[in-house]
């Protein structure tokens, strides 16, 4: 299933957020990590610039995704470990009048 993540998630303490088939969501060291078998997203609350990054797990290099980024994750067999925080960082997109999608702020 595809999950939409907000552009600016709320900072949180160190915790496990979800586990899935080949993926994991967790927060640590002022970063929110959301992984799936295909991608590793990181929201850096104290980064320069603050925002969403995508990590190349082979090289360990983090690439800034630009202002306004709102990632999506394809997760299977999702086991939400912190339902309250998961609800705070995800959203359901709504169709606009042009048939496109509006991002979750």
Image (spheres, helix red, strand yellow):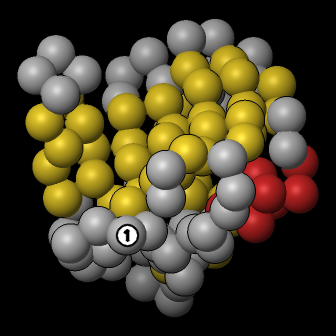
- Seen from the viewer's position, the closer of residues 9 and 2 is 9
98 relative position to 6: left or right: left
Within 10 angstroms of label 1, few (less than 14), some, or many (20 or more) residues? Answer: few
Secondary structure found at label 1: loop
Foreground: 12 or 66? 12
Count the labels in the image: 1
Which residue sits furthest front? 29
Residue 88 appears in view:
yes
Q: Work out which residue is located at the far bottom of the displayed protein and give it.
A: 97
Q: Is residue 54 above or below residue 103?
A: above
Position of 66 compared to 40: left or right?
A: left
Residue 55 screen position, x and y as percent: 25, 36
User: What residue is at 62 percent from the left and 38 percent from the top?
Assistant: 26
State the quadrant of the N terminus. top right
Q: Is residue 43 above or below residue 50?
A: above
Q: Quadrant of residue 49?
A: bottom left
93 sits to left or right of 62: right
Q: Is residue 28 above or below residue 45?
A: above
Residue 33 location, x and y as percent?
49, 42
Q: Quadrant of residue 66?
A: bottom left
Q: Residue at x 68, y 19 (%)?
A: 20
**Residue at point 43% right, 84% down?**
98
Mark 1 = which residue?
46
Residue 63: image x %, image y %?
A: 15, 49
Percent coordinates x, y for residue 88 in the rendering: 76, 66
- Quarter of the image where one finds residue 84: bottom right
Q: Residue at x 24, y 22 (%)?
A: 57
Visible residue check, residue 51: no
- Quadrant in which the C terminus appears: bottom right
């Amino acid at each position: 299933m595809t999950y939409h993540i907000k552009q600016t998630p709320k900072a949180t303490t160190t915790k496990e957020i979800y586990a899935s088939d080949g993926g994991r969501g967790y927060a640590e060291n002022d970063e929110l990590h959301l992984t799936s078998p295909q991608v590793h997203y990181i929201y850096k609350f104290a980064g320069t610039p603050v925002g969403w990054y995508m990590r190349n797990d082979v090289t360990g290099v983090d690439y800034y995704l630009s202002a306004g980024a709102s990632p999506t994750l394809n997760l299977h067999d999702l086991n939400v470990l912190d339902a309250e925080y998961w609800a705070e960082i995800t959203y359901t997109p709504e169709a606009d009048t042009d048939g496109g999608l509006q991002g979750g702020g």
